[in-house]
Amino acid sequence: MSQGQPQSQRILCGILGILLGSLGAHRFVLGDITGGIIRIAITIVTCGVGHLIGLIEGIIYLTKTDEQFIQEYQIGKKGWF
């Protein structure tokens, strides 16, 4: 990891996405408040089926390398998948 690059939140966000994705917890950790609130709203509107978005995102996060995760989600602020 180069100097000045943020520490990866990949494992934390991946686990939170899998376990608490319906509450948008993984998005809140990444600093994406709007994305977290949207995921809560989707879960409410779909009567819980929206938790699949968090589950999928959590799995995707865990399959990335730390460098990929930092570039895409922490620096690039990628919002969906």
Image (cartoon, rainbow, N blue to C red):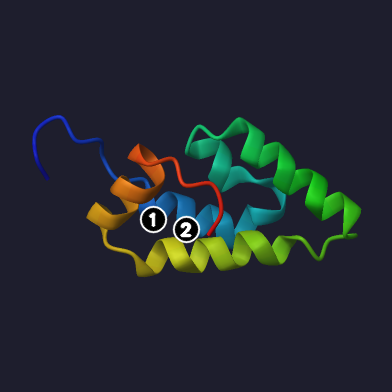
Q: Is residue 37 above or below residue 66?
A: above
Q: What residue lies at 60% left-to-right and 44% top-to-bottom?
A: 25
Circle 1 residue: 11
Where residue 55 sits: x, y (%)? Answer: 61, 65
Amino acid type, residue under disc 1 in the picture: Ile
- Label annotation for residue 35: none
In the picture, the quarter occupied by the N terminus is: top left
Specify few, some or many for label 2: CA neighbours under 10 Å numbering under 14, 14-19, or 20 or more: many
Q: Quadrant of residue 41?
A: top right
Amino acid type, residue under disc 2 in the picture: Gly
Where residue 60 sits: x, y (%)? Answer: 46, 66
Q: Is residue 64 above or below residue 22?
A: below
Residue 1 falls left or right of residue 58? left
Q: Is residue 34 above or below residue 43?
A: above
Q: What residue lies at 15% left-to-right and 29% top-to-bottom?
A: 4
Circle 2 residue: 14
Q: What residue lies at 34% left-to-right and 38% top-to-bottom?
A: 75
Mark 1–mark 2 contact, CB under 8 Å?
A: yes
Where residue 37 sits: x, y (%)? Answer: 72, 37
SS assignment at label 1: helix
Where residue 28 sits: x, y (%)? Answer: 57, 37
Residue 29 falls left or right of residue 36? left
Specify few, some or many for label 1: CA neighbours under 10 Å numbering under 14, 14-19, or 20 or more: some
Q: CA distance from mark 1 to mark 2?
A: 5 Å
Q: Quadrant of residue 2?
A: top left
